[in-house]
Image: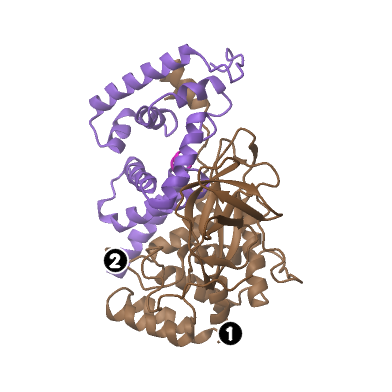
Chain colours: A brown, B purple
Amino acid sequence: MISQLPPSLARLVAANPVAADERRPRAPGAQAALARILATERESPRRIWWPRRRVVSVLIIATVLAGCGAALRAADPFGFWRSAAPGSAQYGVNPAVHVVAPKAGEIGCTLSGSAALTCQPGRSGIRYDMISETTTAVPRQFTRQSALRAIATGLADGRVSATGARHLRADILAVPGSFFAAYEELGRFETMGAGNYGANGKQLVPPHGIPILIACEQLRATIACHNLNGDEHAPVGAGIYAAIPASNWISVPTESLRAAYASSQRLIIAVLGHPFTAVELRFMIDSARYATVVSHSGGVLQGHSAPTLRRTSP
Amino acid sequence: VDSSERERAERFSSIFEENYGRVHAYAERRVGRDVADDVAAETLLIAWRRRDALPADPLPWLYGIARNVVARHHHSGARRRALRRSLELERQGAGAEPADDPALAAAWAALTRRDREVLALIAWEELPVGDAAKVLGCSAPVFSVRLHRARRRFEAELARGVPTARPVPDLTEAS
């Protein structure tokens, strides 16, 4: 077909920036997606409440890969918790601390410390624009009882199948009680990328020292921001701002999937003290199969009273 | 019933195996690698939910679904803003641009998204005109007209040359 194309299109064919990768369907991430898809009930898009799909799938992939490699154990449990990839940030949300996000969509910032920035709308400096807010992915007090109740409710209103409920109940009864607190803790953590992808596996990132993603809160007259990457206790409700590409940005290779998996695996070990056991792994896989949450925003905080607005961390 | 469902699951797994890479590449060219994982998975999930409607040759149908999923991502809250930036980069030539050919990238960046979609379906998705028309939901003759116009504009941009800020490589061999 290519030989029949006019020269301009043939030239375009030769310059294809992303060729289809035949191995991709067999990658762990794709296989996990296929497992989730096949487990999906037809015409039943609403599912039982459960923690965020992305977190669950990343953890499963990390766990599957961990079976092939040596277990790592961090001496300082969260000392590693900072993305080494310059185009993304890893952070944990502290559900006990709530702040107000700035209203400004675009802000200009100056660095006022190693990780702190002072920002104002319309100001010159490093430019950022808001892309999201920090939210809690998992409700507090996720216990064996609350999980069983959620399944019973889901079964009663048709959001989970009888098969799914049977599998989930068995998993919930099999995992140790300490696992629920660990699962809740795992749900605090998130990895966010800022995009800016170019061709050939490259990505544009700001020069060294300028954070690509920052978390900001509105104070009385100013906007206080800090580097989101490595923040283990980011407050709920903070505005997440991404740096706007500028002429001094540099092109770097995008983070490899293996590096991302290794990071997730370190998190699992830091929280649990060990890689997932067989029953814990089954719980994770069945959670992804039968309890995937569809909406990232709706229903996640159901059953929780509105949080008190306060700032407790120094 | 179980046996029939199992057969469907096996058939779908085989369709997944054959097409996931292509759907992922389609998405990655339009929304970047991170979002492409979500778009490809959501596309195949929708296909699974509509498995009774799966055509014998599912690829154009899957591209059509992926196109709608990408459009939804373009219109969703925070992701829209992140995408807007990536699209701005694309217009500047730093996004999903034709690789290793600055002159081509400049001409590409000057086209409308609609022209790019028409050209990409032929050049990058490597679809015949009839299948590309199915993706866009139009007839093959209508698609041919769109392709002809898009190609004419693309060639005009190529003839116009590259911006002065860009290096001008010798493209004799490449073309």
Q: Residue at x 27, y 21 (%)?
A: B145
Q: Please state the horizontal and vertical placement of residue A260, each as a whole percent of the image.
A: 62, 56
Q: Residue at x 39, y 48 (%)?
A: B73
Q: Is residue A152 visible?
A: yes
Q: Residue at x 55, y 33 (%)?
A: B94
Give residue A178's mark.
1
Q: Is residue B96 visible?
A: no
Graded by Cα atoms within 10 Å as few (under 14), some (14 to 19) or many (20 or more), the crowding at tag 2 reads few
What subunit carries mark 1? Answer: A
What is the chief secondary structure element of the magenta stretch? helix
Q: Please state the horizontal and vertical placement of residue A38, each as a whole percent of the image.
A: 39, 62
- Total numbered labels placed on residues in the image: 2
Which stretch did the figure color magenta? B26-30
The residue that disc 2 covers is A44
Magenta-drawn stretch contains B152: no
Q: Nearer the viewer, residue B175 or B19?
A: B175
A43 displayed left or right of A23:
left
Q: Please state the horizontal and vertical placement of residue B86, each as a whole percent of the image.
A: 49, 40
What subunit carries mark 2? Answer: A
Residue kind at label 1, given as amino acid type? Ser
- In this rendering, is residue A112 above or below B2? above
Q: Nearer the viewer, residue A266 or B129?
A: A266
Magenta-drawn stretch contains B27: yes
Q: Please state the horizontal and vertical placement of residue A104, each as a whole percent of the image.
A: 46, 50
Where's the N terminus of chain B, which quadrant? bottom left
Q: Earlier in the sequence, mark 2 or mark 1?
A: 2
Secondary structure beneath label 2? loop
Q: Residue at x 49, y 78 (%)?
A: A140
Q: Nearer the viewer, residue A153 or A211?
A: A211
Q: Nearer the viewer, mark 2 or mark 1?
A: 1
- In this rendering, is residue A217 above or below B169? below
